[in-house]
Amino acid sequence: MRKSTVAIVGRPNVGKSTIFNRLVGERISIVEDVPGVTRDRIYAHAEWLAANFNLIDTGGIEMTDEPLLVKMRHQAEIAIDEADVIIFLVNGREGITAADEEVAKLLYKSKKPVVLAVNKIDNPEMREQLYEFYALGFGEPFPISGAHGLGLGDLLDEVVRQFPANKGQVEDEQIIHFSLIGRPNVGKSSLVNAILNEDRVIVSPIEGTTRDAVDSYVQLENNEFVIIDTAGMRKRGKVYETTEKYSVLRALKAIDRSDVVLVLLDAETGIREQDKKIAGYAHEAGRAIVIVVNKWDTVNTKEQTMKAFEEKVRVHFQFLDYAPIIFLSAKTKKRLHTLLPGIRLASENHAKRIATNVLNDVIMDALAMNPTPTIKGRRLKILYTTQVAVKPPVFAVFVNDPELMHFSYKRFLENRIREAFGFSGTPIKIVARKRS
């Protein structure tokens, strides 16, 4: 299911980070009464009523040649590019400034829906100051106060109303949607081309070449797949992103729409901290995951064996102990035939359901092998277990007191379920519930 994206933009020190923190519900962006505190784009998930969306906070836009401010403006321009709806934030106490007008010109060119929010309108008497903001040409301005949380409901109602109609539509469940995420230049686009057996996606050794999300439909081995990649080069001047910040939002967008996520690693450069951060997004989203070690053709297999590399992966990605590891080369297509079966198995396990009677037989055997613990003189009693969801599989364990379910025993039950039913490639969740 697709999520819309909302970007908050404006000149420096109009309260963008304060509004961002209010909408997200926690203090993520640093807030100071000093222009230029926010320099990079900051991403988070937000929701309003039934709508879930991605929210971007940006640095202030200033039309200047100072190097740092140029980079901040570039980051904001990328956020505008990625957004479905833009909140244009201005300062109601200061009125329209020349910097506001420059930002407005930038937003006209984007041709995106823009909702004008006038911040720092802290009481009804100040609403007369709104009229001058009609001159910016974005329709009715919405009075808000980031400091006091006033007017945000009306603002969000309008933002959600502007979301594209196709967002949130459920796609054909028979088709396996999988995405490729990873650091720049690990070979995501090359792997897409290898799977499709054609040069569908631009490939370049320049990091950040890939820009827009392009879905590729393909029918292979009697299965239908949609490959979600970030593809297509924009204008040369539009590739601003640094290696560490590259495609965070695109990874989130792709993960949202995927059944299976391929976490690509570069066999040549090894494992980086950014690899773990990117994989963490997919794990937290509960998606099926396959770890793909690309560029295996560049490795001297006499010095570096698959087993040795796999051990490194398991050490660094302990939270992905359920994910299979596939070694291949997108360039030479060596071992490429092992990829689709791995994706198919992970997708099947992600949607697998276990009959309640069979599940409880396994749980009873587990209890006989390792009785429940006693905490402060009270013993945990497991009454019965049932599966309550798929994608990912979720198991409700009904007990006498959920507080007696220690995470270590929950982990033990998860391992017994995996031993009995597989679930390779997918996270599973165990939820302790009190029997009513």
Image (cartoon, helix red, strand yellow):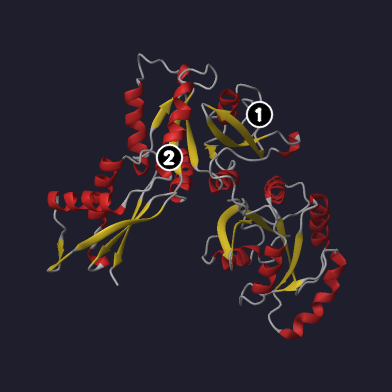
Q: What residue type is labelled 2?
A: Glu
Q: Which residue is drawn at 39% across and 31% down?
A: 325
Q: Which residue lies furthest to the right in this view?
A: 135
Q: What residue type is labelled 1?
A: Val
Q: In which quarter of the image is residue 190?
A: top right
Vertical placement of residue 80 versus 10, above or below: above
Residue 5 makes an appearance in the image: yes
**Frontmost residue, 285 versus 144:** 285
Per the model, the C-alpha gap separating discs 1 and 2 is 28 Å
Quadrant occupied by the C terminus = bottom left
Q: In this view, does 411 lie to the left or right of 36?
A: left
Circle number at residue 342? none
Q: Quadrant of residue 53?
A: bottom right
Q: In this view, does 376 lie to the left or right of 235?
A: left
The spot of residue 343 in percent (x, y) is: 46, 34
**Frontmost residue, 239 versus 337:** 337
Vertical placement of residue 337 versus 171, above or below: above
Circle number at residue 201? 1
The spot of residue 194 in percent (x, y) is: 57, 23
> Of callouts 1 and 2, which one flags the residue occurring earlier in the amino acid sequence?
1
Q: How many marks?
A: 2
The spot of residue 178 in percent (x, y) is: 53, 38
Q: Which residue is drawn at 53% across and 22% down?
A: 330
Q: Residue at x 44, y 50 (%)?
A: 284
**Frontmost residue, 220 versus 293:** 220
Residue that numbered label 2 is attached to = 348
The spot of residue 419 in percent (x, y) is: 26, 41
Q: In this view, does 139 lie to the left or right of 66?
A: right
- The mark lying in front, picked from 1 and 2, is 2
Within-10-Å neighbours for mark 2: few <14, some 14–19, many 20+: many
Q: Do the residues labelled 1 and 2 touch (CB within 8 Å)?
A: no
Within-10-Å neighbours for mark 1: few <14, some 14–19, many 20+: many
